[in-house]
Structures are given as structure tokens and as C-alpha cells.
Image (spheres, rainbow, N blue to C red):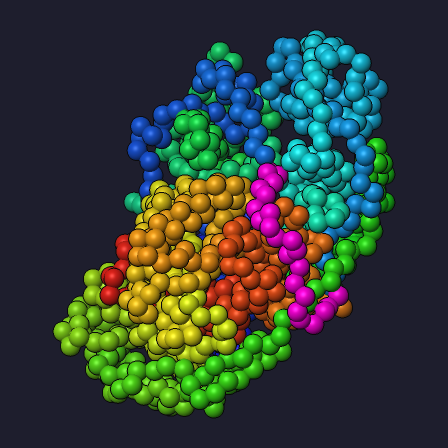
């Protein structure tokens, strides 16, 4: 890591956020590891420790765990409780509820393509032939899919039992039927509307099966995609894979990393749906991280400190995702109930039964420790939608921990060991994809399923025609330089001055450092002054405050002393990455005092590549005072670009913070505006979005004496399931409010483009067995016909396989061609000032995520308004 920092070319310029938030990274960091797009070097600036500031406890993102205190006793014991693995009937017997909720539709196709858009294909750029991780369905089946509802009498709640009993009638149903436990799909219509069959279970219980015709499913319906995916899953069962969650993994091919007590299960994430012209199967290589330890092991470890073992155990297990081997399901731990043990009883089918007896009877599992506490899991989404109070009870010794904790992610040796298997270069990934296809075509059970449904899957990777957008020119104070083939202009700082710097230099600034680290401080300052001078940034001598211990309170008191001189910024030299100290410094600077702060660790100051690191610190300090290191050539005037993202609070799971970052007219003054507001953690829509946007518009008007004529809004943090809600409410609300605001001041409504940015995509591109270059655009074949969308590869990656970003233009009155929309988006990826190269998403999105994560992880309060024109969060 030190070597990477010394070179200064593979590490971004992030601040030293010792964040415990899992929202600070782009790539998903849950139990499923999608192989890193760049080996953690270039694809995601937020994912890396800083050159100038090192992270402590760098943590996941993706999907983003939030910490919370334990619920009250009433909340903990309230509602129905049943052990994990209990059937619906067992849960219903206990709770008295007969509610059966319909399954959500994962393939809701939201048509957002404007009717007036004739073609979404661009033309400019150098053509490039690409392979993708898609397989084409050669022949589109001319099906007439019949949909049936299946009921059993007496009722059977276990889906596997229902499937087993129904399978005895395969000769009646036909070999090509699909049954998911509730719904039956076939390609032929039964003679009668209601078909009645008789069946018998292994326990010699007679059942009556009623199969009632619901209707027909056309290929234009979202349910058609559901059937396609059911067929695919049925065919994959022949590969002897384990279904964990929604994806298939191969425990027999597990990779043991014994020195870290981990296992990696290789597997696949698959999705099949209608694309532009063909039905395509997308296949992505995934790895599931399994720890060899159980939650009970964590309990024993925490028991070594008897006085605090309950609090420590809660801290270590809350929000963990665990796997129960007996039913192969995953659960999130929401609470720990120390008042109950496996000897406690619950009501099951009219009688009280202990958890010990239940697991012995149903699964033949003997619980060894009868005094361990119980774990509580609650489906928060269901609770939000239906006010359900159902609780699932878990036994610690039966729960295997999945995923990585924060300490593991900060363990460089562990992450390097894992990356040897999860970070695949394009050639290796292509081999794995072809191997998967060969297994589907050579496994008799899989072949039979595909044949029964008349599906012929192409054995070759789907090829597409992409285009490479021309290199962009980076604008410095005295000239322009090309971004280069790799979109990296780090070396240009050797002979270029930053675009804007303080006219009087950086004066009235302070440094807080331990007395024992005076030598490291002097070395850091010498290099900082030398690096800054070469970039046209002048430093005056700082006010130095020496402290004699490194306690958090000492730094805070020293900051209070410094504030008396009204400093423009404060730099703190700290001995290590301590989360508490870091948060306290940031809170004092941004919540109480409105003073930008920079935190640098002693380890960073000792780095042998200190000159390169000092260059990055100088750039950061310039940005934190509101100035701009570089710009790009921008042909559009009167343009405001906006990025918006949401990060959950790590302190209170009910809270989240939305951050909006907007550029002013970048042709005029190259400045930005940022603001934060609190919002609900359970709703992807932000009811404070318009007030934040109105503040940005007022700031633009103050600087330019008019409102922007063009607005491009990049919306991050939206899942495909929330797209319809976003389109119906958030977009329409923004359009209406903008029209009213401009009408109020007597101006014509602005040209608006509202673009949803999605990083967590399974699509991958390969160019001659390697990664495509930065600026590669794909807008055909694998895009979706109901959307105005395109893929953009904006970065050069040196390790692993590049991950393209998907852009879905859900609304546009810009009146510009797809070419210009794609070029503008690519240009915006050149303006993230923590990294002298392109980023995976437009800079305003990256800034918004950075700011929201800082507030949700470290500040837990809204920063001072006086900081809104400064990049204080870098």
C-alpha cells in the first residue's frame, strides 16, 4: 500500500474517513462479492484509503449496514415469534394471522423512453467491437403460457413438500411445467378450468390438489420475464448449485482461506429478459463470503469481558447477515434477547414447545448450549409495508456469519488474499462464463429443462458495437493538456498551475500536532510547501499548536484555541486512524465552528512517497477553501449539473441524510454548491429534495444574476424496484416546481434532463480479451427498449474487469442528441478533485455520496451553511 501511495497514481485523494459506514464504497459489499472492477484501485475513489489521509476501519457499502441501539423490551418481545425455518402454518398458528402476502414483481418494466425520441443511438466516436457477459436466446419461443393457481387441502405450508407431492403428477401436467409452490405455469391448456388431483405425502396423508386456470401470459408482460427466470433457475438446478438468497453458489468448489477463517463460495448471478432485439441471459461471476465461525463463537469471545459482554456482543452482531445451514436461508440480526434461551417455549400448532425440542424434532439438530441468548430478526421491509410484527428467532450456534466486518476490510493481508480469487482479469472471467455455458449445455438435467421449454441458448458471448469518445482536454491556469489514453493527468501537475487559487495564498491557517511528532510535521510541511509552490499555490507560515497527548478531548480543546484567530482551515496531525477522534475533529470543525479541517496520520507523513502525497494534500486544501484545481472544456453555457445521493445514519437506523451538490456555470467561475438534509432511511424518495434544489438555484442566481437555462440532474442511489415510484413522483414534482419557480421570476422553464445513475450493474465488456478504454459507450443490443439508456466505461482499470455504469435518462427536455448527452456525462466524470483521473460516475454524484456518507457516519448533524461553497468533505 505504501508503494501505491508513493507513486501517487493508483490511489485517490480521499480524506482520512475512518468510517464505519458501509455506504462509502461504490461496489456492493455484502455477503455477495461481485468481483472488483478495478482491484480497488481506480474504479472507485471512495473505496480507498487516502494518500493524504488514511482510513481506519474502512467499511462496506454496499449495501450498507447501519448500527442501532437495541429496541426496548416491549419492542423486543412484542409481536409474534417463531424460530427460523418455521413454516408459515407454524407462524400462523402462533400469531393467529392468516395473511398471505403476494410476492413482489422483480421485473417491473418502467417505460421511461420519451415518445418523441426516434433513436437513442449515438454516432460520434471511434468504433470498437466488444464482447459482453450476455448469452443470446437464439429462438424466441412462440409460447402460449398458461397460468394456474394451485391449492392443497389440507393446507401445506412448506413449498418443498407441495412441490414434491405435485411432482407425482408429472405425467398429467407434462414434463415442461413450472411450479414455484403457489403458481403453476405450462405451455398447454388443460381441458377443464378446474383440475382436481389426489396426492399422498410420505407421512401417508391424503391431499386434494385443485389447479385453477388464472389466464394466459403474453410475452409483453413482466410476468413473462418471471417465467423465463424460473425456467433458467430450474435448468441451473442440474449444476448441483446451492440457492442462497437469490443466487446460486457451489459449496463443493469452495475456496478455503484458512489463515483468516474464511470460505469463498463461487457462484453466479443471472437474469434473463428482453433487451433491444433479443432475449438475453446476463451472467455475472459472484463469490459469497462465508466465515467458518458462528455467532456463538462471537458470543464466547465477548464473554471474556463479563462486565460488558452484552453490550459488546450486541455491537459485534447487530445487522450481521447470517446463514442457517439447516434451511439454507439468510437473515439480518436486528436484536439480541438475553431474557430468553433455547429452553424458552413458543406456541406451535396449538401447543407450547421449546426451541431445543423444535430443532431436534424438525431438523434432528441438537442444541448444545441451552443458556445462550436468542437472536431476533425482523423483516423491516414487510414491517414498513404491512405493519407486521412477526419476529424470527435464531439460535447463535446454528448461525454462520457471512460477509466481512470492518476490521476484516481494514486488514490488507486478508483483502489481498481474497482478491486473488475474486478479482478476475477479463480473460479469466471469459473462461468462467464459457465454462458456465458449457455446463448448461452438457448437464442432462439442464438440457432437458431447456429442451422442454424449446429454449436454445447461444454458446457464444454476445457481441456489441461500441464507440470510444474522444479524449477530453483538462484546463489548467495557463493552458490545456489532453487527459491521455488512460484518462489520468497526474503527471501534468509537475508543470501546470491549478486553475484557481487564493490570490493571497493560504494564510491564517493552523496546525495541531503532538509535540513528539515535531520532526514528522516539519518534513510534511517542507514537502507541502514545495509541492504547492509548483502548482501556483502559496502557503504562509501556519499557527502551530503543540499538544502533549493524543486524546480526543485534547484535539478538540486545541481546535477551540485555534478558532480565536479565525483560521481559514485547520490541519490535524494524528497518530492513527481513530474513528472517535476523527469524528470529534470533523464535528467541531463543521457543526460548531464552520472551519474546514484536514486530518493527516503520522504514517502518511512518514511515507517514502511523501512528495506525491503532499501534492494531493495541497490540492485538497485548495478545494476546501472553495477553489478549483482544473476544469474541462464545456461547450454549454448556462448549465447547472446536480448530483444527489442518500446515506444512512450509522447511529440511528431510522435516519438518513441526503446530499445535493450542484455546479454553477462552469464556463464562468468553476464553483460548486453543496447542501445536506435529513430524510427517512426507509424511503428512497426524499421529501426535502426540492428545498435543497431551490437553495442551489438561489445560489446560482446570486452568482450569475439569472437562473440556469439548462439543468442536468444525476440521481444516484435508486434501485430498479424504486424506478417507477421515482418517475411517478420525484421527477414529476421537480418538473412542476421548476416551472413554477421560473414562472415566478418571469423566465422560461429550463431545459431539464433527469438521469438515474446505476453502478451496481452485472454487465461487463471485453475488448480483445482485455478491458475497453475510458470513454467507451454502449447504447444498443444489451440496453432496454423501454428506456433511453446507455452504458459508459469512464475509467482505465489496471487490475480486474472494468464495471460500466448505466445511465437511464428518465426525463429530458434538453433537445440535445444522444451523442451530446453521452459526451456531457463523460466530461462530468473528469471533475472529481480527489483524484487526477476520471471517476466511475459524474463528479457531482461522487461529491454527493462523499458528503452524505460523512454526515451519516461521522457528523450526524447538518453542517454549517457557511461551508456550502467549499469542498470541506473531501
Which residue occupies 51% across, 32% down? 368
Instruction: Provide the major secondary structure of the magenta segment.
Output: loop
Measured from the top left, where is residue 777 in percent x and y?
A: 64, 64
Quadrant (top left/top right/bottom left/bottom right) for the C terminus:
bottom left
Question: Which residues are drawn in magenta?
Answer: 106-129
Horizontally, residue 757 falls left or right of residue 306, namely right
**Left or right position of 849 against 322:** left
Q: Residue 642's spot in the image, x, y percent?
A: 42, 60
Depth order, front residue of 296/572: 572
Q: Nearer the viewer, residue 608 or 824?
A: 824
Q: What residue occupies the far left of the structure in this picture?
A: 564
- From this view, report whether residue 170 is shown above or below residue 558: above
Q: Is residue 825 above or below residue 376?
A: below
What residue is rendered at 45% in x and 47% in y? 731
Residue 128 falls inside the magenta stretch: yes
Would residue 857 be found to the left or right of residue 331 on screen?
A: left
- Residue 116 x/y as whole percent: 60, 50
Give the residue at x 84% y 19%: 171
Give the camera-side residue of 10 and 115. Answer: 115
Q: Position of residue 384 (x, y in %)?
A: 42, 33
Q: In terms of depth relative to the viewer, which is nearer, 856 or 334?
A: 856
Q: Is residue 254 above or below residue 211?
A: below
> Which quadrant holds residue 526?
bottom left
Q: Write down the quadrant of residue 537 in the picture.
A: bottom left
Number of numbered markers: 0
Residue 868 versus residue 167 in the image, above or below:
below
Q: Is residue 582 visible?
A: no
Identify which residue is drawn at 42% across, 72% down: 666
Whether the magenta-drawn stretch holds residue 223 is answered as no
Does the image show residue 80? yes
Amino acid at each position: 500500500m505504501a508503494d501505491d501511495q508513493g507513486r501517487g497514481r493508483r490511489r485517490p485523494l480521499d480524506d482520512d474517513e475512518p468510517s464505519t459506514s458501509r455506504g462509502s464504497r461504490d461496489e456492493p459489499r455484502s455477503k455477495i462479492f461481485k468481483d472488483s472492477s478495478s482491484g480497488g484501485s481506480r474504479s472507485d475513489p471512495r473505496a480507498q484509503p487516502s494518500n493524504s489521509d488514511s482510513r481506519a476501519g474502512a467499511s462496506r457499502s454496499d449495501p450498507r449496514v447501519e448500527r442501532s441501539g437495541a429496541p426496548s423490551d416491549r419492542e423486543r418481545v412484542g409481536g409474534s415469534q417463531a424460530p427460523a425455518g418455521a413454516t408459515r402454518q407454524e407462524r400462523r398458528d402462533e400469531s393467529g394471522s392468516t395473511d398471505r402476502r403476494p410476492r413482489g414483481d422483480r421485473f417491473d418494466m418502467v417505460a421511461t423512453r420519451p415518445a418523441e425520441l426516434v433513436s437513442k443511438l449515438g454516432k460520434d466516436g471511434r468504433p470498437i467491437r466488444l464482447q459482453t457477459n450476455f448469452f443470446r436466446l437464439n429462438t424466441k419461443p412462440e409460447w402460449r403460457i398458461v397460468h394456474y393457481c394451485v391449492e392443497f387441502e389440507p393446507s401445506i405450508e412448506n413449498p418443498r413438500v407441495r412441490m414434491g407431492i405435485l411432482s407425482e403428477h408429472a405425467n398429467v401436467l407434462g414434463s415442461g411445467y413450472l411450479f414455484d409452490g403457489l403458481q403453476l405455469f405450462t405451455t398447454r391448456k388443460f381441458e377443464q378450468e378446474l383440475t382436481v388431483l389426489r396426492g399422498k405425502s410420505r407421512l401417508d396423508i391424503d391431499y386434494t390438489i385443485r389447479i385453477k386456470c388464472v389466464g394466459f401470459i403474453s410475452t409483453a408482460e413482466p410476468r413473462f420475464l418471471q417465467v423465463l427466470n424460473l425456467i433458467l433457475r430450474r435448468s441451473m438446478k442440474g449444476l448441483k448449485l446451492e440457492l442462497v438468497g437469490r443466487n446460486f453458489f457451489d459449496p463443493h468448489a469452495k475456496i478455503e482461506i484458512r489463515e483468516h477463517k474464511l470460505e469463498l463460495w463461487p457462484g453466479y448471478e443471472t437474469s434473463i429478459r428482453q433487451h433491444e432485439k433479443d432475449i438475453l441471459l446476463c451472467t455475472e461471476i459472484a463469490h459469497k463470503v462465508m466465515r467458518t465461525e458462528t455467532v456463538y463463537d462471537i458470543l464466547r469471545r465477548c464473554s471474556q469481558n463479563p462486565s460488558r459482554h452484552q453490550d459488546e456482543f450486541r455491537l459485534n452482531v447487530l445487522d450481521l447477515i447470517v446463514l442457517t445451514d439447516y434451511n439454507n436461508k439468510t437473515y439480518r440480526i436486528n436484536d439480541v434477547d438475553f431474557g430468553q434461551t433455547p429452553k424458552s417455549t413458543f406456541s406451535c400448532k396449538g401447543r407450547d414447545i421449546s426451541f431445543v425440542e423444535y430443532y431436534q424434532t424438525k431438523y434432528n439438530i441438537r442444541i448444545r448450549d441451552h443458556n445462550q441468548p436468542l437472536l431476533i430478526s425482523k423483516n423491516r421491509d414487510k414491517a414498513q409495508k404491512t405493519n407486521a410484527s412477526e419476529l424470527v428467532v435464531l439460535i447463535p450456534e446454528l448461525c454462520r456469519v457471512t460477509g466481512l466486518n470492518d476490521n476484516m476490510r481494514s486488514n490488507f493481508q486478508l483483502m489481498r488474499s481474497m482478491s486473488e480469487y475474486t478479482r478476475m482479469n477479463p480473460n479469466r472471467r471469459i473462461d468462467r462464463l464459457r465454462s458456465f455455458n458449457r455446463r448448461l449445455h452438457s448437464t442432462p438435467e439442464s438440457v432437458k429443462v431447456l429442451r422442454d421449454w424449446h429454449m436454445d441458448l447461444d454458446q457464444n458471448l454476445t457481441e456489441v458495437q461500441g464507440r470510444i469518445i474522444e479524449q477530453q482536454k483538462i484546463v489548467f491556469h495557463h493552458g490545456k493538456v489532453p487527459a491521455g489514453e488512460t484518462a489520468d493527468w497526474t503527471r501534468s501537475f509537475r508543470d501546470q498551475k491549478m486553475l484557481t487559487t487564493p490570490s493571497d495564498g493560504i494564510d491564517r491557517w493552523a496546525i495541531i500536532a503532538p509535540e513528539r511528532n515535531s520532526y514528522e510535521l516539519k518534513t510534511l510541511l517542507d514537502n507541502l510547501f514545495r509541492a504547492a509552490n509548483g502548482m501556483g499555490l502559496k502557503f504562509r507560515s501556519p499557527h502551530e499548536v503543540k499538544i502533549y497527548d493524543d486524546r480526543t478531548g485534547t484535539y478538540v480543546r486545541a481546535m477551540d484555541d485555534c478558532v480565536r484567530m479565525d483560521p481559514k482551515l485547520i490541519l490535524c496531525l494524528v497518530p492513527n486512524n481513530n474513528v472517535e477522534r476523527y469524528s470529534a475533529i470533523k464535528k467541531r470543525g463543521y457543526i460548531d465552528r464552520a472551519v474546514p479541517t484536514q486530518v493527516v496520520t503520522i504514517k502518511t507523513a512518514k511515507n517514502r512517497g511523501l512528495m506525491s502525497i503532499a501534492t494531493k494534500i495541497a490540492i485538497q486544501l485548495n478545494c476546501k477553501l472553495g477553489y478549483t484545481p482544473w476544469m474541462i472544456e464545456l461547450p454549454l453555457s448556462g448549465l447547472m449539473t446536480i448530483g444527489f445521493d442518500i446515506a444512512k445514519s450509522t447511529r440511528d437506523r431510522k435516519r438518513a441524510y441526503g446530499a445535493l451538490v450542484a455546479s454553477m456555470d462552469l464556463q464562468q467561475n468553476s464553483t460548486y454548491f453543496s447542501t445536506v438534509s435529513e430524510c427517512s432511511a426507509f424511503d428512497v424518495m426524499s421529501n426535502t429534495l426540492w428545498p435543497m434544489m431551490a437553495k442551489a438555484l438561489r445560489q446560482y442566481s446570486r452568482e450569475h444574476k439569472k437562473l440556469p437555462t439548462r439543468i442536468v440532474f444525476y440521481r444516484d442511489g435508486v434501485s430498479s424496484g424504486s424506478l417507477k415510484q421515482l418517475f411517478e413522483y420525484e421527477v414529476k414534482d421537480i418538473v412542476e416546481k421548476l416551472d413554477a419557480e421560473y414562472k415566478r421570476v418571469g423566465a422560461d422553464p429550463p431545459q431539464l434532463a433527469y438521469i438515474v445513475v446505476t453502478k451496481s450493474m452485472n454487465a461487463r465488456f471485453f475488448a480483445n480479451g482485455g478491458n475497453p478504454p475510458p470513454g467507451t459507450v454502449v447504447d444498443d443490443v444489451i440496453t432496454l427498449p423501454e428506456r433511453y439508456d446507455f452504458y459508459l466505461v469512464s475509467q482505465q482499470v489496471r487490475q480486474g474487469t472494468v464495471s460500466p455504469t448505466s445511465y437511464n435518462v428518465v426525463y429530458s427536455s434538453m433537445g440535445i442528441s444522444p451523442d451530446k448527452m453521452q459526451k456531457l456525462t463523460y466530461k462530468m466524470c473528469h471533475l472529481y478533485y480527489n483524484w487526477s483521473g476520471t471517476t466511475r460516475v459524474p463528479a457531482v454524484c461522487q461529491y454527493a455520496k462523499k458528503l452524505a456518507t460523512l454526515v451519516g457516519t461521522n457528523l450526524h448533524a447538518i453542517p454549517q451553511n457557511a461551508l456550502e461553497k467549499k469542498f470541506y468533505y473531501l
